[in-house]
Image (spheres, rainbow, N blue to C red):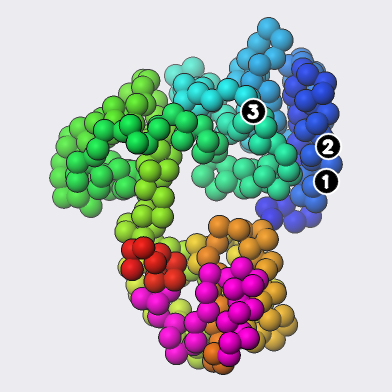
Amino acid sequence: MTVKNDKISVLILDDQLVQREGISRVLESSESMRIAGMASTSDEALELLKSKVFDLALIDLVLKNEQGTDVGRAMRKIRPALKVIIYTHEKSMVLAAEIIKKSKETSEPGLHGYILTRKISSSHYLLEVYEQILQTGYYIDPEVLRWHYRLEELDPLTPREEECAILVASGMSNSEIANRMIISLRRVENLINALYLKFRILGDPGDPGRRVLLAEGIKLLYGNRLSTFYLKLKLLIIEDQETQRIHLSSEFATSGQFEFIADAKTGQKGIELAVEKKPDIVLTDIKLPDIDGFQVTRKILHTLPQTKVIVMSSDSSSTYISEAIHVGALGFLPKNQVNIDNIMKLCYPIRY
């Protein structure tokens, strides 16, 4: 959870009473977020901002006589640290580009999120969106991306375009891509321009929002292949035996496929580190000094359902194996079989 002592303060701006009240009821059940203000007009919202500090603003796209994006930018001029999410029933990549777009010339700030109104059905969903914004700077509903790209209609990428695309999605700059692919900067620029055309991303070539949309489209197309082939997987180890912990951390730290981010001696510390660092893969021993690995698995997956948790133990009993699967672990490994190949086979069986 991002905020431990104080709840995330939220401002709702919506001129439709029923919709505004519906969103407020969703947030009322949250342990992490609180409604700190509600407004039906931009004037009301801007006045609230002058007297109170909010972490997040949820704004309907269509307001009376104005666009929520314009109001959101006005809000961020008053409170630059404010995170702004626009919600709407409309699916549009033009809108996605408009939301993310920012201009140095006019000092217009960009906004952070684009979600569909019908998705606002749980506070947990809103918290996940907010968490991603804190991590990456933006969030675009994947449904909007799928609707736009209609991947089966995309022109096929050449091998060089594909390699460049995956490096773009990994967050590399043009110069880093040039070094990785051993080509000129001009060649990288040409490849990326070709990707913009194939992914149907229009707009000003100098708009950084286009790069964001391209990266998100590539992630949608390649999915886990990004991590499997090019990006390092973030790994967390929860193990109370020091020799085993040192052995594992050393093995994975030197692997080109993994980024060893942390280890923990207790289950509770492992859970806290998982929530804080959001690993791709968690290795947890069953026997820990405070709580067992099955409880650890449940708690991590409750907060981070996309994380792959692998349970390990020196005892390979059938009871342990079945319980690991029951609590949602990806699989079970005896400690003497915990190695890179076996972990990758569990996480990406199609690849391996």
- On the image, the x and y values in percent for residue 335 come to 49, 87
Q: Residues within 10 Å of mark 2 (few under 14, many from 20)?
A: some
Q: Are marks 1 and 2 in contact (CB under 8 Å)?
A: yes
* Marks 3/1: CA–CA distance: 20 Å
Q: From the image, tell me which residue sits under label 2.
A: 25
Numbered disc 1: secondary structure = loop
Numbered disc 3: secondary structure = strand
Q: Residue furthest top?
A: 65
Q: Are marks 2 and 3 in contact (CB under 8 Å)?
A: no
Disc nearer the start of the sequence (3/1) = 1
Assess whether residue 157 is covered by the magenta stretch: no
- Horizontally, residue 330 falls left or right of residue 228, namely right
Q: Amino acid at mark 3?
A: Tyr
Most foreground residue, 154 or 300: 154
- Stretch of the chain drawn in magenta: 317-343
Most foreground residue, 1 or 351: 351
Question: At x 55% / y 48%, what residue is drawn?
Answer: 135
Q: Amino acid at mark 2?
A: Arg
Q: From the image, tell me which residue sits under label 1.
A: 29
Assess whether residue 340 is covered by the magenta stretch: yes
Q: From the image, tell me which residue sits under label 3.
A: 87
Q: Amino acid at mark 1?
A: Ser
- On the image, the x and y values in percent for residue 214 come to 38, 35
Q: Are marks 3 and 1 in contact (CB under 8 Å)?
A: no
Quadrant containing the C terminus in the rendered view: bottom left
* Marks 2/3: CA–CA distance: 16 Å
